[in-house]
Image (cartoon, rainbow, N blue to C red):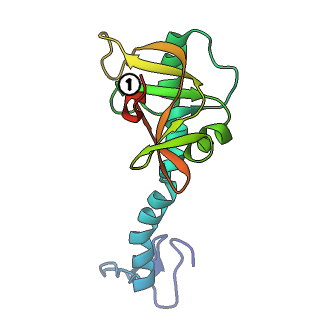
Amino acid sequence: MQLGEASSADSWTDSLGETEAPGQPAMKTRLGPGLLLLIFLLPACLTAAGRETPYEKFQRQHVDTSGSWEPDPNRYCNLMMPRRNMTVSFCKDLNSFVHGALAMITAVCGSGGTWHHEDFYYSNSPFQVTDCQTTGASRWPRCIYRGDICSKRICVACKNGQPVHFARPSVCGGP
């Protein structure tokens, strides 16, 4: 029955499923418990599905496999920090991007690295790394970064054979 159509009981149904009879208040349609459960759980399920794993977060924040990054480290940092969602609600003060193949970076948690302590591994070989640090003029939402490119061994925390946290080399006893 369409909006405004008369029924045999001289009432009509609107687009929300409410039935009105002339001179009577609208009757609300009851929602079943299954539909109510769906309404309340669906947003939670969608949120959980959208969360990144610690390994995915590590990749987003610290890995650049492009092979052709911006040669100017200041420009690189000012492009990459917002692109990787690290300036959404505040300016992340310090971040490092490791340039190389994901397999080589992940290998630091195994044969490509040496266990140091707890879950930390120190890479056996150096990687090209761009360190990005906020400048004194940086105020959210206008985050401004100074970049520095160097070759160094990296220190990462690993879970289940995957890097999940980037640490300063000094955490692994490096310079």
Q: Residue 127 at x, y = what percent?
A: 59, 26
Instruction: Give the answer, above or below, for where 108 lies relative to 77.
Output: below
Q: Amino acid at mark 1?
A: Leu
Instruction: Give the answer, above or below, for where 118 lies relative to 44.
Output: above
Lateral position of residue 30 relative to residue 125, left or right: left
Q: Residue furthest bottom?
A: 9
Q: Residue 83 at x, y = what percent?
A: 53, 28
Q: Tell me the quarter of the picture where residue 31 sits.
A: bottom left
Q: Disc 1 designates what residue?
A: 94
Instruction: Please state which of residues 3 and 152 is positioned toward the viewer in this rendering.
Output: 152
Instruction: Give the answer, above or below, for where 26 lies relative to 92.
Output: below
Number of marks drawn: 1
Q: Residue 106 at x, y = what percent?
A: 60, 43
Instruction: Please state which of residues 114 and 128 is positioned toward the viewer in this rendering.
Output: 114
Image point 45% across, 79% down: which residue?
35
Lateral position of residue 88 relative to residue 151, left or right: left
Q: Tell me the quarter of the picture where residue 29 sits.
A: bottom left
Q: Inspect this view and state whether residue 67 appears.
A: yes
Q: Disc 1 on helix, strand or loop? A: strand
Instruction: Please state which of residues 58 and 47 is positioned toward the viewer in this rendering.
Output: 58
Instruction: Give the answer, above or below, for where 174 lies relative to 161.
Output: above
Mark 1: few/some/many CA within 10 Å (<14, 14-19, 20+): few
For the C terminus, give its image quadrant. top left
Instruction: Please state which of residues 82 and 4 is positioned toward the viewer in this rendering.
Output: 82
Lateral position of residue 86 relative to residue 114, left or right: left
Image point 62% across, 11% down: which residue?
71
